[in-house]
Amino acid sequence: MRSHFRGMTPRSMPIGAVLLAVLVSLVASLILGATPAAAQSADEMRARLGGIERELGHIRARLGMPPVGPGGGSGVGSGGGTGELIVRLDRLEAQIRELTGKVERLEFEQRRIAEDAARLFGDIEFRLTELEGGDTSSLAPVPPLGGLDETAVAEAVSISERGDLDRAVEDVRQGRYDQAEDRLRSFLSSYPDSPLEAEALYWLGESQFVRGAYQSAARSYLEGYKSDRAGAEAPRNLYRLGVTLGRLGQVNEACLTLAEVRSQFPRGPREVLEGVEDEADALGCG
């Protein structure tokens, strides 16, 4: 296409060629953006596809061409340059249909992974409740990962809220575990649905883990992960849940949980991902 347009300015190029160049650029951006490195969701890819399809419709209208029919063809036959444009537009439309199919397959795979994760965490919660001597019949099903709104929203945190949590965290770091856990439980009670809830539960789990209270620690990590599945503490809570399940002898669940960290957070904190690999090796995960 570069040689075909060489030496032509936007003013001198036929309108069909200009519009086609715009469409090629749009489709190219979609293809490049669809790589795993872009880490896009299926919804984002589908939104971009929708925009490109609308742009394609506008281009066909400006070229005096009818919309694409159910069979996918242009429905127009013409010779010369216009005929070539029609052929190239049809090819671009075919690429869009192919990408649409890939998005649908990606969405299906995402749903399957979300359902598998929900079953895993439901099983972990059941086992923890059994170990704690609780009533397993009262457990509610864990919703699939994609069933929740995972959009990150910046929420205001008060000075007192941040300060209370920081003091509790410092107690954990200084080994004042009883005082730390009292403060952390008070924090969770005083600030229900706080944006810092996942962080507070992570540190509660850390304190309990150090004291050898693995059942309680696993519960804290699990609740911390469930409270904010897309937040900054989610990879750490999930990783430490896997470690703690290993300490409880739940090796299969531990390995599956560690694998979930790699699957859900491939670009998570390096120390977490390295810890996952070390723990998986220590547990003999396949």
Image: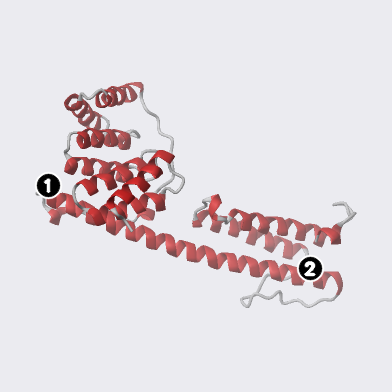
Could you give the CA–CA distance between mark 1 and mark 2, rounded to whole angstroms?
A: 69 Å
Where in the figure is residue 20, as x and y percent of width and height? 76, 61
Query: What amino acid does circle 1 point to?
Result: Glu
Q: How is the image coloured?
A: secondary structure
Q: Is residue 141 visible?
A: no
Using the image, determine if residue 61 lies above or below residue 259. below
Circle 1 is placed at which residue position?
Answer: 132
The reply to whether residue 9 is in sight is yes
Residue at the spot of label 2 = 85
The mark tally for this picture is 2
Residue closer to the observer: 73 or 24: 24
Please identify, in this view, whether the residue under mark 1 or under mark 2 is nearer the observer.
1
User: Residue 231 falls in which quadrant of the image?
Assistant: top left
Query: Where residue 161 sits in the image (x, y, percent)?
Result: 31, 25
At label 2, counting other C-alpha atoms closer than 10 Å, the crowd grade (few under 14, some 14-19, many 20 or more) is: some
SS class of the residue under badge 1? loop
Image coordinates of residue 217 in percent, x first then y, are 21, 40
Left/right placement of residue 250 relative to residue 16 reads left
First-in-chain label (1 vs 2): 2
Compared with 53, 186 (above or below) is above
Identify the image quadrant of the N terminus: bottom right
Query: What SS does tag 2 mark?
Result: helix
Q: Is residue 136 left or right of residue 104?
A: left
Q: Are marks 1 and 2 in contact (CB under 8 Å)?
A: no
The residue depicted at 33 percent of the width and 50 percent of the height is 281
The amino acid marked with disc number 2 is Leu
What residue is rendered at 71% in x and 55% in y?
A: 25
Q: Is residue 79 above or below residue 143?
A: below
Q: Is residue 261 left or right of residue 82?
A: left
